[in-house]
Image: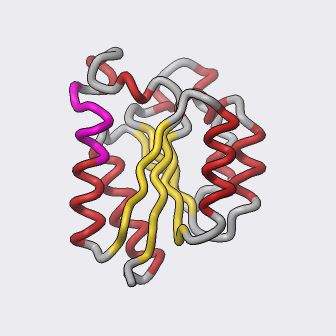
């Protein structure tokens, strides 16, 4: 049976393709999820892709991932810089965690340079556009021995 990977996207990523395309590109989150699902299948994995603008919902999904998800890939959006609750939830999860950012957060405003999630993540991929999700999925497959 293939291992399940949970892909979580935080606030405003539902507007991907529409919001600041000069930073985030024109690909929609549905496009990204479809590309990731195809790659996951090729890698012998299953993917559960979710998005919420609500911190508590993301925390709940991280808790749910404790039962059955082999790994988490997360783009916490702005919660990267503010959410100790998401960090605490990830710290209670035993599998590998990879953090993805479409833009290079280190080339942006100073408040974006720190991510609480990074202290829990096995790796951080930033600045590769939506291709970063695919890179994270390939790395997750390696970490899971898929």
Q: Position of residue 140 (x, y in %)?
A: 43, 67
Q: Position of residue 93 (x, y in %)?
A: 69, 63
Above or below — where is 95 with respect to 85?
below
Q: Viewer-proximal residue, 140 or 59?
A: 59
Magenta stretch, overall SS: helix
Q: Viewer-proximal residue, 48 or 105?
A: 48
Q: How is the image coloured?
A: secondary structure
Q: Residue 61 vs residue 128: left or right?
A: right
Q: Residue 113 vs residue 30: left or right?
A: right
Marker count (numbered)? 0
On-image quarter of the C terminus: bottom left
Q: Position of residue 120 (x, y in %)?
A: 67, 56
x 69%, y 56%: residue? 63
What segment carries the magenta color? 26-33
x 77%, y 39%: residue? 84
On-image quarter of the N terminus: bottom left
Asked if the magenta segment contains residue 115, the reply would be no
Above or below — where is 96 with respect to 21?
below
x 35%, y 50%: residue? 133
Which quadrant would residue 55 be assigned to in this image? top right
x 39%, y 57%: residue? 136
Q: Viewer-proximal residue, 68 or 10?
A: 68
């Amino acid at each position: 049976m293939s291992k399940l990977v949970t892909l979580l996207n935080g606030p405003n990523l539902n507007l991907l393709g529409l919001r600041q395309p000069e930073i985030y590109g024109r690909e929609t989150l549905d496009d990204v999820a479809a590309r990731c699902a195809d790659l996951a299948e090729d890698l012998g994995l299953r993917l559960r892709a979710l998005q919420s603008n609500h911190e508590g919902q993301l925390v709940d999904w991280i808790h749910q991932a404790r039962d059955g998800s082999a790994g988490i890939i997360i783009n916490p959006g702005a919660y990267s810089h503010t959410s100790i609750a998401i960090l605490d939830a990830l710290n209670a999860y035993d599998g590998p965690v990879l953090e993805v950012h479409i833009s290079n957060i280190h080339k942006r405003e100073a408040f974006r340079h720190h991510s609480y999630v990074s202290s829990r993540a096995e790796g951080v991929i930033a600045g590769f556009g939506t291709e970063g999700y695919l890179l994270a999925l390939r790395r997750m497959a390696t970490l899971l021995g898929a």
